[in-house]
Image (cartoon, rainbow, N blue to C red):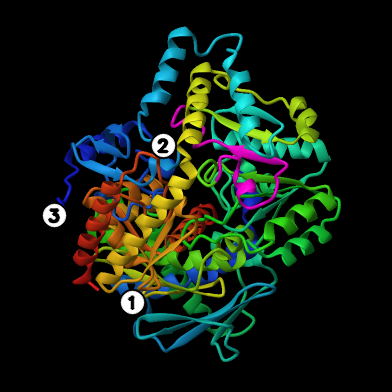
Amino acid sequence: MKKQEECVLTDSKTLAYINMYAIFGTLENLCELDENARALLKNKKPISIGFDVKNGPAATLYFKNGYCRLEDGCNPKCTIKLPFSSCEKFNGMIDGTVTPFPSKGLIHLGFLLKSFTPLTDLLTKYLRPDPKDLEDPVFFETSTKLMFYLITVAISQIANRDEIGRFSAHLIPDGDVKMSIKGGPAATIRVRDHHLVTIKRMPEKYRAIMEFESIQLARDLFDGKVNAVACIGQGSIAMGGMINMIDNLNRILDRVALYLA
Amino acid sequence: MASKYYDYTKSNELFKRACQVIPSGLYGHQGPAEGCWIPPTSWPYFTDHAKGSYFWDVDGNKFIDYMCAYGPNVLGYNDPDVDAAAIEQAKKENCVTTPSAKIVELAELMVDTVASADWAFFMKNGNDTTQGAIMCARAYTHRKKIIFVNGFYHGVSMWTQKIDYPGVLPEDVANNLYVDWNDFEALEKLVAENEGEIAAFISTPYLHGNFFDNVLPADGYWQKVRKLCTEKGIVLIVDDVRAGFRLDLAGSDHFYGFEADLICFCKAIANGWNVSALCGKEFLKSSMSALSYTGSYWMSAVPFAAGIACINKLKKLDATKMFREKGLKLTEGLKAAAANNGFNLVVSGEPALFYLRVADDDSLLIHQDWVQEMVHRGIYITSHHNHFLNASLTDEDIARTCEVADDAFKAIRSKY
């Protein structure tokens, strides 16, 4: 059962956007980082799945040569189309409580069952890891990198959709923020007129930076074992530049945990 | 003279211990995260002792301190006159069941000193005074809503925080309205849209928020605000916790030519001894009397004795004139040091509470680098907060500060 606080302070539409762009978006990185993921998609014809959520997000996942790409909007030419009557139904699919039914591409049901579902199961394995799996350094690193991409994308979705996230976003000036793990993945959070977009690569120039000193530190932070304020004080999270950008992103970051709990 | 580059070995060791037993090691504005120590390794975490304009950290490094404990150090650390009054009072009594007569003496002194004050109500922190002011305004008007100026800081009560702060509920800030500083038309519009619902307008005497240049009131702004508040039955609260007694001993409202209904003081009352005060107009006295508002240490006598000595000494020294003169001399010297090295240092706010920004990039990274070089060389300033002057600051301190500023600009010149 969700805690009372979560019931009051999150909304299903924002969660749907997080599920679409942050969760499904991380499939791109999963295919880059894990050869088992690529193996699930290899030797198959290019295929695409369109997700169309009424009063919610729409996007298309493209699979080709073992890799995956998420694009905004449900492409009418998609191979398989999965419509959802509400954000709640779409979120239910992510939770495993709703079974979607294709309105197009029923013939490709085999891909959904034999490739796509195992792929999302593999992603779940990394994003909700068994503590024992994390003892394997390779798994640990892949899992933490995927968490990093998931969280950086979720920040933008919350900033643009969630009522309290929008309040934080309206205090962020324009510019690029670099979020990174030292020696590891980096992302750009681009702010224009208080609208945030996450780009999963390092910015060429930035107005503010927040960098985690190690992948272990990032993991501990994502798992809630350490606090960002304490880490900044100890120097294990380096911040610089326009601190009001970082300060408000940190407030949104707090809400990521609420949505992904 | 070349500046020594400080080492913080003992401070860092102590901070590790602190992290074991204190949330975030050091919290709030005096800690590394909220204090914007960028990077934290350039700042001392803990002090050992202080005197006048200086403090020494636990590694023995001496600093000329332009933060003045974020304001309370107004005469100089351990001022002999204030401390003597406090110690004499401590020998007699401090926190006793029935308050000392010192409370009456300090209240009379506040009323005599602060132009808009008909009464004084004592507490401990600035936050206590803003909280008391809001409660008083609501009790008097029987209205819910409060207007804030964007970029405000009025303490840490839940109503002063923002909807996205941890531990704050939307309901806590549901009656907060926001307007931009110096935008009287927007304020008028907001008042019209909430006719009969606004209990108070609360603001610092000028905008000294963080991360941007401080902004003084536009000509006639406060006078128009005063008139509007009077016409609409809105209590006008001036939060003078930060600027109080540094611009004008009669209050910063007096400095800018208007009268607040309620005015909050804290930092400069007692030179570091722990007391704050809400002063108000006669018509609000009854509402203030009605509040259930008190605290275990609010009537302790020692800070009252210190406050009396401090205010009298500030008057004797004509301290506000001194702060302005020293502030101007210092900031002109800092700007010259920047210009000598090809940088543009922007100084804003009143000279007594000057705010600094190196304006050579749009990210503040150069500014933060210069600030940390200053601290590492013994000049304690902060990246994104206004600074404070105290009466013990000497011309030699100012000259030394400008010399170090030159060194610090030279140190970063090669990087940018």
Q: Are marks 2 and 3 on the same chain?
A: yes
**Is residue A245 shown left or right of residue B24?**
right
Q: Tell me the number on the disc at residue A38.
A: 1
Front-most of residues B115 and B410 = B115
On the image, numbered disc 2 is attached to which residue?
B73
Query: Quarter holding the N terminus of chain B?
Result: bottom left
> Label 1: few (<14), some or many (≥20) within 10 Å?
many
Which range is magenta?
B248-273
Q: CA distance from mark 3 to mark 1?
A: 64 Å
Under circle 3, the secondary element is loop
> Is residue A130 something one can see in this rendering?
no
- Please tell me which residue is depicted at 23% across the width and 38% down the height of the picture: B11
Query: Quarter holding the C terminus of chain B?
Result: bottom left
The amino acid beneath tag 2 is Asn
Q: Is residue B262 magenta?
A: yes
Q: Tell me the number on the disc at residue B1.
A: 3
Under circle 1, the secondary element is helix
Q: Is residue B287 above or below residue B252?
A: above
Q: In which quarter of the view is residue B342 placed?
A: bottom left
